[in-house]
Image (tube, helix red, strand yellow):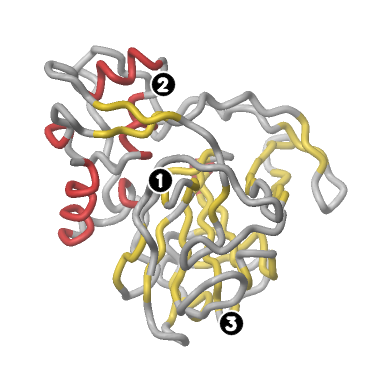
Amino acid sequence: MASEAGGPRPLGPDSGHRVWRLAVRAVGAALPVIALIVSLASLAVVSSCATSYDQRGVYYKVRMGESIWRVASIHGVDVQELAEFNNILDPNDVQPGTKLYIPPKSKKGGYKKLPFGTSVAGGERKPSKYARRKGGDDYTKPIELYRGRFDWPVDGKVSSLFGLRSGQRHDGVDISAPSGTPIYAAADGKVVFVGQMRGYGNLVLIRHPDDFFTAYAHNSKNRVKKGQPVKKGSHIADVGRTGRATGSHLHFEIRHGQTARNPIFFLPENRAVASRAARAAR
């Protein structure tokens, strides 16, 4: 289904940036304002899933004696972000000659106008145990794996990993499965969006504790309603190929606040996926 990540390249004349952002602002002690920010432009199909967008970064070839912590320090990026972007589950996979994608430094968010006519603060959330931490050369700060924080949302084969794919950023994982295969909530939460979005097709968005969101896209049918509480394992949608998708699959994202996180770092261990990630890192 999906092609492997290549070097950054410019989009065609009919293509544009795709930015998908989430933000939450607490109002008082118990009234959260939940916001979904979407800015979508037409995008040429470069793989099986059109939920990718162009965001430039650079590639760096690891030299003798360098670790992932050293590379993060050289480029001034978050070591956890570097690991997640490159599917580095084990620091020992970073060997001399390994080609790492260095993501561009993020800009601080401001107040954003939402499609629903509400403005919310789009800045960083308060620190939590899930926040990325800068590692530099400090080997005492390991790459964090939050195994089991979420469950696999569908039974199928991971066909595309998080990170760079065909020169475009892919902010989730694609899981191939026959059309109509049940999609399950990856954790307890509350449905905050149900509907269609260009590129994503039928989409379900769930908010979870600790400022997390999960997104389930390209569904053939959504089976929940906005505002509905759901339990982990609840049947929320069916696999499909709505939106821009070649072949039936689920595009699954995990967001911590506005930040896209690599689902593989949060899902129960899958040996096939871990092996593929290790091969991709070499």
In the rendered structure, the answer to whether residue 15 lies left or right of residue 148 reads right
- Say if 255 sits above or below 106 in the image: below
**Residue shown at 24%/12% (left/top)?**
137
Q: Which residue is mark 3?
A: 221
Where is residue 187, by image quadrant?
bottom left
Three-letter code for the amino acid on which mark 3 is drawn: Lys
In this view, which residue lies farthest toward the right? 117
Q: Find the residue positioned furthest to the front.
A: 13
**Pointer 2 with pointer 1, Cβ within 8 A:** no
Q: Nearer the viewer, mark 2 or mark 3?
A: 2
Q: Give the residue number, with chain letter if any, for mark 1.
A: 163
- Quadrant holding the C terminus: top left
Question: Which mark, residue 197?
Answer: none
Amino acid type shown at disc 1: Gly
Q: Residues within 10 Å of mark 1 (few under 14, many from 20)?
A: many
Q: In the image, residue 127 lies at what x, y percent?
A: 48, 25
Element at label 1: strand
Tell which of 183 and 208 is nearer to you: 183
- Mark 3–mark 1 Cα distance, whole angstroms, equals 27 Å
Where does the image place residue 235, in percent across and percent down from the top left? 47, 78
Closer to the chain start, of discs 2 and 1, is 2
Residue 12, relative to residue 153: is it above or below?
above
Q: Quick check: 244 above or below 257?
A: below
Is 72 positioned to the left or the right of 228 in the image? left
